[in-house]
Image (cartoon, grey):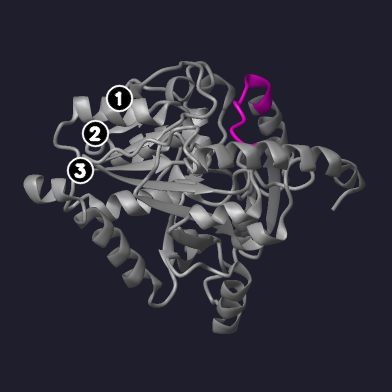
Amino acid sequence: MTFLRLLAWPLSFLYGMVVLLRNKLFDIGILPSTTIKDVSLIGVGNLTVGGTGKTPHVEYIVKLLDPKYKVATLSRGYGRKLGGFIIADNLSTTDQIGDEPMQFRHRFAEHIPVAVDANRVHGVKKLREHFPELQCVVLDDVFQHRWIKPGLQILLTDYGRLYYTDHMLPTGNLREPKWGDKRADVIIVTKTPQLFSPLERKRIIKEIKPQPWQKVYFSYIRYGNLLPFGNLPGLVEVEKETFINADHSIILLTGIANSDSLEYFLKDKVKELIPFRFRDHHEFSPADLLRLQDIYRNTKNEKKIVLTTEKDAMRLHKPGLDEYMGDIPLYFIPIEIAFHDQDATSFQQQIYDYVRSNPIHSKLH
């Protein structure tokens, strides 16, 4: 912990007291938390600031439910410049709906309704108006938005910075005290190594101290093949195995909360990895891309590409930015999550059991 963060302890204490009072007001009903009974609500969130993998976990749940149920996503739309309720369409931009909803739209096209609304209660009701057959809404980043009460609340925590070892903002990265985890029905430890020790699993569960009603699962990231961004004709999909023991240089452009896991995945697979990092949800500018061109030109290796994340690619798809990309071969790497061992079957069954428990589904399914 840095010296400046240690100095921030008094602010962390005050912030924690404010959040504690707010949660207590919700707990005793002075602040209302709305339950919507005619649709199943699955909340996905965290206790920390960003970087736990909410987006791929939302996608996992949507793909799991989609064959059997009418499902939609609802997000706040962090960083967008428009307010109110919006349903994403083919003309939507990150300025209108935010980068995560843009990624959902990119992944699911028109098949799955993707909506944004800072007021989640209003957003769910509007979704039901537009799609009366809707059976389930997956709520993105909703753990602290207590005005709505999901029937199933999923809490994510990054294996590299588990919430029970963290501290309140601004000393640490916690949005609320650790005991907020008691509101979760499911706790998922994300971004674990693909080869994961059963002893480590037991140790973490012991530290979490789950309540009798809580299930703990462990997930990891699977990286897909490199896909062309589309700025240059002729670029094709590249298998990620191409870079194993290869002599390529990769300039990694990121504007996400935590790029450590991606950098770790790439660093021993390429000759040279050059991180070019920005803060989470960074809106890329012409100046940023001109700097990127300089880095690309100054990289001596002839076998070189620029790689970004799928979420960052959504923010690069903005009018006026294309001309600043020059002749850079730009790719993005999609990700998905997978669960360890028996966790996949158990987690899927818990999701199905919850959704089936809503009587509305027997009428619509």
Q: Are marks 2 and 3 in contact (CB under 8 Å)?
A: no
Element marked by disc 1? loop
Q: Earlier in the sequence, mark 2 or mark 3?
A: 2
331, above or below 272, in the image: above
Quadrant assignment, res 12: top right
| Residue 108 place in picture, x, y as percent | 29, 41
Measure the C-alpha gap from mark 2 to mark 3: 17 Å
Label 2, on which residue? 110
User: Pointer 2: residues within 10 angstroms few (<14), some, or many (20+)?
Assistant: few
Residue at 47% over, 17% down:
319
> What amino acid is found at the position of numbered circle 2 in the picture?
Glu
> What amino acid is found at the position of numbered circle 3 in the picture?
Gln
Measure the C-alpha gap from mark 1 to mark 3: 21 Å
Query: Which mark identifies residue 278?
Result: none
Residue at 27% over, 34% down:
113
Residue at 71% over, 40% down:
17
Label 3, on which residue? 135
Q: Work out whether residue 237 can be spotted.
A: no
Q: Are marks 2 and 1 in contact (CB under 8 Å)?
A: yes
Element marked by disc 2? loop
Quadrant assignment, res 114: top left
Label 1, on which residue? 89
Residue at 36% over, 65% down:
347
Q: Which segment is the magenta one?
A: 280-288
> Which residue is nearer to you in this view: 101 or 2?
2
Q: Are marks 1 and 3 in contact (CB under 8 Å)?
A: no
Quadrant assignment, res 85: top left
> What amino acid is found at the position of numbered circle 1 in the picture?
Asp
Q: Work out whether residue 17 can be spotted.
A: yes
Q: Does the magenta-highlighted stretch encompass residue 58?
A: no
Element marked by disc 3? loop
